[in-house]
Amino acid sequence: MNIETQKQKMNSFIDSALTRKPLRLVRKQAHLSDVDSRYTPVAILSAGEGTSEEDAAQQHPQHVGAREAPLRHMSLFDLTAFGVGCTVGSGVFVLAGVAAHSYAGPSASISYLVAGFVAALSGLPYAELSAAFPLDGSTYSYAYITLGEVFAVISSLCQTLEYGVAGAAVSRSWGNKFVDWVRDGHSQNDGGNALPAGLDKFLDPGYGINPMAAIIAALCTLLLLWGVKESKLATNIISTTKVSLIVFMIVAGFLLASGSVPKGEEAPASFDNWKPFVPPEFGPEGILNGASILFFAYLGFDCICNLSGEAKNPVTDVPRAVIYTLTIDGVIYMLAALALTAMVPYEEISPVSGFPRAFGVNGWIWAEKLTAIGEILVLPLVVLTSIQSQTRLLFAMSNDKIVPKFFGKVSVSKKGSSCCGREKEDEIGNLTANVQFCGVVVMLLAAFVPFTYMDDLISAGALLLFSMTNCCLLTIRYKCPSESFLGSIRDIDESASIFSIATVRRELSLGRLLFVLNVFPFISGLCFTFIPIDAVRYSLTGVFAVLTLTVAIYMACYCPEITSNRFVLNRDGYGVRGHRRFRTPFVPYLPTLAIYMNWFMLANLGWKGIVMLIGYLLVGVIMYGTCCSGRSLVYSWYNNNDDNFTDINYKSQNMLPGRLSPPMGNPDLQQALLEDDIEDVGEENWKENTTNGQNGDLKGELSEIETRNSPFV
């Protein structure tokens, strides 16, 4: 292979890797009608112009029952129950005891509060992006629209760690807990005798094999295959049961500590166990160390955004569900930590089974058994929601032709017999092949892969994912300084000195700003973690923290907000008072703080987690470059529609390495979005004009520009 061929292949890879999804395609994949601006169910059969669906079904009987996507069926309660099911679990049953016993004592409740604040820093950008782009895929979709295809692939790799791999890890943890529970119960009921040899060998065959983990993953997969309505009902019931169980544990703990209910002799439950509230051996540093591990109790709230394509009203319900989930989690975690440390002195709390042992030492044996059984019953919900989230991610990637198309096949099946003796049809549709594939993979991982070193890899992937989400938010909010300085980049003197302010502003593009905004926090965290000398460690940590803040201030001062983006995102009836989309406050400072905290905690995970994450992402990107690059739907659309571009070099000019250009699409649309007369419309004028109905003509013009020469019309 000659050098020229290699150069062409590299340019082709860069060209496809930096391709972004155009707005027209986003609206089509969200099933958003340009006529009534409503999120509508996808027709079972796409009938041509002048052809009814019945005639189309007769002409093409082989396609009857085919759909592009499952129908929108999830309400606000369904989304919130799904989010609580993804998050609440080990954060109460396991981490509460670990944090109180080993890190912070009674002040573990403050650690939960700090961790919840850090999680909310990334949760608010998720809420805004889910309202702006109501698609399946969560960060994968947001990155594809704002950053480019390769960043979308990287985010999908991180999401796979958080969804599929984490689901397998939870399955394995459940399998171990189930085996211990069976052994303990048999020992107590059979005079201390061990399990029969055959049963014990089945439950724990050795060699790192965990059969019960595979069984619970298989049961969750079968429930998802049974139907979307059935799995949704199970999720709602188990989430409600889980919250009810935790509320019982909290109330019972406070009642025992108050002495208002009977308890065993020499029971340690008392509010005096809170003294001292911050144990001297831990101190304030223990609160922060506890928050660093309790942060991962909030992981999973972003799974809600992964179901935006199935929400009835995604623009309003998904952001609310994210915020409600984080609020419910924070309140439950704080109260649970307080109740646990009130029942037992923090030195005596079991780091393995905190609440059951606490009830046991206080003489409530029935409550001990209830909480142990409850944990066994409700923990599989995390496995169910993880597999479901993974299938929706692969569904979104299949729509973009990055993974095989069978992941996006929607089946409509007839199941069972109703009470009248007739078969019922699944009206929503299910991703049958997708669920089968994901379920089998999770079963194999759970049964045969020990997760000794995987926890750090999963945590590192989640933290990188949250940082990318915040970068997506900054990308749709701001434009490059080089595009706004003196009105246009053409107004800058190319022969100016490299030390001039104009040159500095031109070179500090948004892409480079985002790059240093992620690098400085990571270096700050590395300095804090690995430098042994305290004076040097704290000094360098503070220096890079100040540099991070400086970048945020520069962005706020010299990167004007893209008001045209707000205009376009509000075009679907959400610009009027009372129907506004959720917007993250204190931008860019809040996303900057979130990015800093994410990278700082990632650096504190240690070198094993960092090295494993780098190796995992390298393998994934190499596979993408080898197998998928240049074959995606978006890249193919651009290549097949070069005539739509007024400038034949428009695409390559907007894909310069190190520079994040405006979102790609029809150049007429881009010109309309960057016109000064549109950008100069201030927020107050926009509100007034929207209220008075004076933006209708401009909205119509934008819609006409957007649909002009589009193959999707």
Image (tube, rainbow, N blue to C red):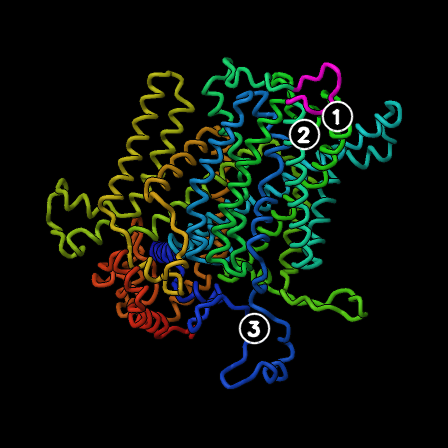
Q: Is residue 397 left or right of residue 255?
A: left
Q: Can you say which quadrant of the picture contains the N terminus?
A: bottom left
Identify the residue shown where x is 33% and y is 34%.
520
Query: How would you classify the magenta stretch by its main secondary structure?
Result: loop
Q: Which mark is residue 43?
A: 3
Q: Nearer the viewer, residue 551 or 242?
A: 242
Q: Give me the residue at 59% from left, 25% from top.
A: 98
Residue 266 among magenta residues:
yes
Question: In the shown orientation, is residue 164 left or right of residue 364?
Answer: left
Q: Secondary structure at mark 2?
A: helix
Q: Earlier in the sequence, mark 2 or mark 1?
A: 2
The boundaries of the magenta stretch are: 258-269
Which circle's residue, 3 or 2, is located before the other in the chain?
3
Q: Residue 17 location in percent, x, y?
A: 40, 54
Answer whether labels 3 and 2 touch (C-beta < 8 Å): no
Mark 2 touching mark 1, by CB under 8 A?
A: yes
Residue 2 seen: no
Residue at x-position 26% and y-position 68%: 647
Task: List the single residue furthest toward the front.
Answer: 260
Q: Secondary structure at mark 3?
A: loop
Identify the residue under disc 2: 252
101 to 153, vertically: above or below:
above
Q: Is residue 111 found inside the magenta-colored segment of the image?
A: no
Find numbered disc 1 in the image and state the secondary structure of the residue it sits on: loop
Quarter holding the C terminus is bottom left
Where residue 13 sits, quadrant-wise, is bottom left
Total labels drawn: 3
Look at the picture and state if 319 lies above or below 606. below
| Gap in angstroms between the C-alphas marked 3 and 2 | 51 Å
CA gap, disc 1 and disc 3: 57 Å
Q: CA distance from mark 2 to mark 1?
A: 10 Å
What residue would you read off at disc 1? 364
